[in-house]
Image: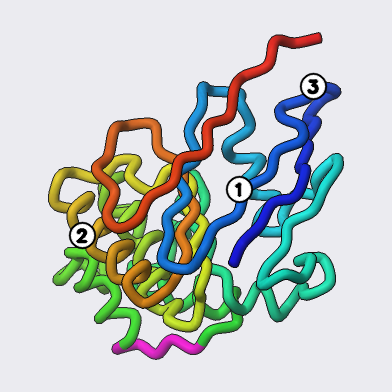
Amino acid sequence: MLEGIDLACERGERLLFAALSFRVEPGTCLHVVGENGAGKTSLLRIVCGLLAPTAGEVRWRGTPTRRLREAFWGELAYVGHLNGVKDDLTAAENVRFAAAIAGRACGQEDARAALRALGLAGFEDRPARTLSQGQRRRVALARLQSAAAATLWVLDEPYTALDARGAAVLNALIGGHLARGGIVMLTTHQPVDLPGRVERLELAAREPA
């Protein structure tokens, strides 16, 4: 399971949230909501170990993630608000590059299959700079297809720039992951009918001191 214990976060001398606790069981999607500036992205980055909390800790399977480090990262798949897609690489090369950074094996056919699953058949060898924003988002999300060993998916605004078909494909991916006992933690700005068992965590924007 994933747990946040009495988490607090300060950015630029501003307290975003404090005494925040949550617990997410296998097969559950935790939908983090709140106004701009409430700390949604900061919370996701804390969960991934990309940002240290001001107070509190994140636990994975009952152990603080700061003690697990590589073992935890091996079970984590993170797609941030920015696509992290390199313009000079093809769509398939981007998928393989992202998998290599995460320490996961991803052959050429694996990458092409991942892109086809995201509705990008025929675009595998196109340079990323020639793709639309929605297609680039699908390239970023295709890395989830190569993250079969990742139990925890952390997704920051994954539906951004996706059309209805792209949103349906992503819903199917998330639904399948939850059905296998995975955990998803995500943020969205737009209203989305999320699949599976969904719990809501609302962050309230704080007035500047």
Q: Are marks 2 and 3 in contact (CB under 8 Å)?
A: no
Number of numbered discs on residues: 3
Q: Nearer the viewer, residue 113 or 208?
A: 208
First in residue order: circle 1 vs circle 3 = 3
Q: Measuring from the top left, give residue 176's x and y in whole percent.
A: 29, 70
For the question of whether residue 131 can be seen, the reply is: no
Question: Mark 1 belongs to which amino acid?
Answer: Leu
Q: Measuring from the top left, give residue 54's x and y in whole percent.
A: 85, 40
**Which residue is under mark 1?**
44
**Which residue is under mark 3?**
14
Residue ID at (61%, 26%): 38
**Which residue is under mark 2?**
169
Q: How much space separates mark 2 and mark 3, taking CA atoms?
A: 38 Å
Quarter of the image holding residue 124?
bottom left
Q: Measuring from the top left, give residue 160's x and y in whole percent.
A: 34, 41
Question: Mark 3 belongs to which amino acid?
Answer: Arg
| 64 lies left or right of 116 | right
The stretch in magenta equals 105-109
- The answer to whether 94 is drawn above or below residue 78 in the figure is below
Quarter of the image holding residue 174?
bottom left
Q: Are marks 1 and 2 in contact (CB under 8 Å)?
A: no
* SS of the residue under disc 3: strand
Magenta-span inclusion, residue 82: no
